[in-house]
Amino acid sequence: MQSDLSNSATQLKLYQVNYGSFPTALDANYCPTLPIADTARCLKASSGKTFTYTSNGTTFGLTETSTNGISYNVTNSTAPTAGAIITGSPYIQTITAANCPSTRTQVQDARDSHTYWVQKLADNKCWMLTDLGYAGGGTNTYSDTRTLTNGTGGDYNYTVASYYVIPSTTNFTTEPTAPSTSTTGSGQYGYLYNFCAANGGQTGNGACSEFSSTAVNTAISICPSGWRLPTGNGGEFGALNTAINGGSTTTDAGLIGAPWLGQRNGYWGGFDYFDGQDTYGFYWSSTQVSADIVNVLFFFDTYANPADVSGKISGMAVRCVAA
């Protein structure tokens, strides 16, 4: 097994020399699938043993496991050693609707290294399972950084893309610490955003204006590259509620439980006015109703409405879906 891993590490490093990064995934035959297939560098596990691989392009971790449970691992910077290790969660920007994992998987945002969970759910959509906690700026590898203003302590503003920090509740994490997995609707609220920020500060439509009901450009949002805001007025939020909450309008139990783990994050209402934490959950959709009203997912213990409405000037949470 140590020989297998040594040889495989050499293959991965040759790949990195040729293509500028390590492959971020391997196909079923242990061949690289990103950024380009190279069957000459398929990794070889010995008979009766399997590989587990993860990479964010700049680091990798490879574990080989036998049928009797013995495992060895190697990384881009370590020699083969006993025990399983997976390092370097993949970037969320490399996860698509097509390659979305069917099990709960930790990823990191290439912009700021904050970690999230993602999974393809019963509605056949690839969802973030953690509230977004992006404050703007960062590394622009995927051309998806945004300019945001910390509006905490300020007044309402339609036209400035703003985020709001809930006092003493935000619990952001970076590699290798896993983010919150709260099943009670509390614990990791992420930041709250006005509608302008949720839509990436785009102009020329209703995203950052109180006077326009022109539909937003759904290809632009605060979400990582390849991800977007869900649709409202039922839409993707409606399909999600049907798939994981039985379509109920009288309980949010399926929404705050596994796997989606929705948060009762409350809302921001201006001048440090935060309300409803641990009681109400609000999530932006990309669907406008009028010049100042937007469809949202709204829920609490005895209520769930995937086609509710709210003013787009408020601060609410974001969960992204793979495009």
Image: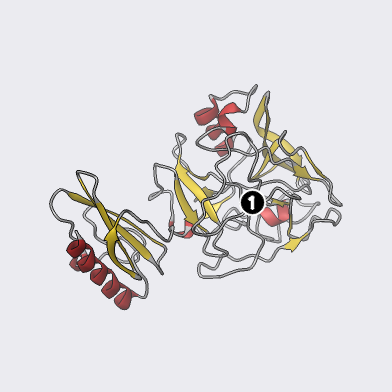
Any part of residue 25 in sight: yes
* Residue positioned 56% across, 29% down in the render: 254
Q: Residue furthest bottom?
A: 17
Quarter of the picture holding the N terminus: bottom left
State the image coordinates of residue 302 (x, y, percent, origin top left).
68, 23
Amino acid carrying mark 1 in the image = Asn
Query: From the viewer's perspective, is 135 left or right of 93?
Result: right
For the rendered model, the colour scheme is secondary structure
Residue 79 sits in quarter: bottom left
Relative to 293, does residue 20 appear above or below in the rendering? below
Report the number of numbered marks: 1
Between 1 and 269, the residue placed more toward the observer is: 1
State the image coordinates of residue 31 (x, y, percent, origin top left).
24, 60
* Residue positioned 53% across, 55% down in the render: 115
Between 233 and 306, the residue placed more toward the observer is: 306
State the image coordinates of residue 112 (x, y, percent, origin top left).
57, 64
Query: From the viewer's perspective, is 196 left or right of 238?
Result: right
* Residue positioned 73% across, 37% down in the render: 309
Query: From the viewer's perspective, is 211 left or right of 193?
Result: right
Relative to 99, does residue 303 appear above or below in the rendering? above
State the image coordinates of residue 34 (x, y, percent, origin top left).
34, 63
Between 200 and 17, the residue placed more toward the observer is: 17
Q: What residue did someone put label 1 on?
A: 171
| SS under mark 1 | loop
